[in-house]
Image (cartoon, grey):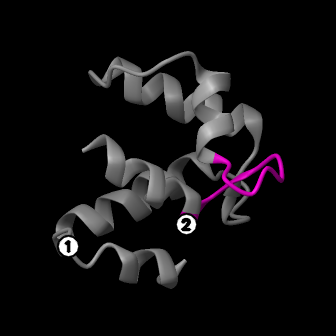
Amino acid sequence: MWRAVLQCVALSAVVVMQMISFFQYFDADATGRLTTEQFRRLHADLVLNGFQLPECDAVREKVDSDSDGYVSFNEFVAWYRTQI
């Protein structure tokens, strides 16, 4: 997880802590990666909070850059940076 945090150097410490907290909220089993269902809840929350995003499965496929079926924190950070 810290590798992703270091990639966020251009982001403020407050934003980084919010990203960690946000991701951990949806990572209910604390594995450091989101299942498809966990990502669906994350996606729905983002949309409810004003993000204009394509359909969930299309976003998840884009975010899951290694195509392992999960969204890791590193993948989430890399994608999220393109959204803000």
Kindly identify the residue that appears in the image at 82 percent across and 46 percent down: 69
**With 52 as the anchor, is 77 left or right in this view?**
right
- Give the mark, 2 or 1, whose residue is nearer the N terminus: 1
Type of amino acid at the residue the image marks with label 2: Asn
Q: Main secondary structure of the magenta part?
A: loop
**With 57 as the anchor, is 44 left or right in this view?**
left
Q: Nearer the viewer, residue 82 or 5?
A: 82
**With 32 as the anchor, is 9 left or right in this view?**
left
Residue identifier under label 1: 10
Kindly identify the residue that appears in the image at 26 percent across and 21 percent down: 50
- The magenta stretch is 64-74
Residue identifier under label 2: 74
Q: Nearer the viewer, residue 29 or 8?
A: 8
Other residues around mark 1 within 10 Å, as few (<14) / some (14–19) / many (≥20)? few
| Residue 12 found in image quarter | bottom left
Other residues around mark 2 within 10 Å, as few (<14) / some (14–19) / many (≥20)? many
Q: Is residue 62 above or below residue 25?
A: above
Q: Can you give x and y, in whole percent of width and height, for residue 72 in the image? A: 65, 60
Q: Can you give x and y, in whole percent of width and height, for residue 56 in the image? A: 60, 22
Query: Mark on residue 45?
Result: none
Q: Secondary structure at mark 1?
A: loop
- The quadrant in which the C terminus is found is top left
Residue at mark 2 to residue at mark 1: CA–CA distance? 15 Å
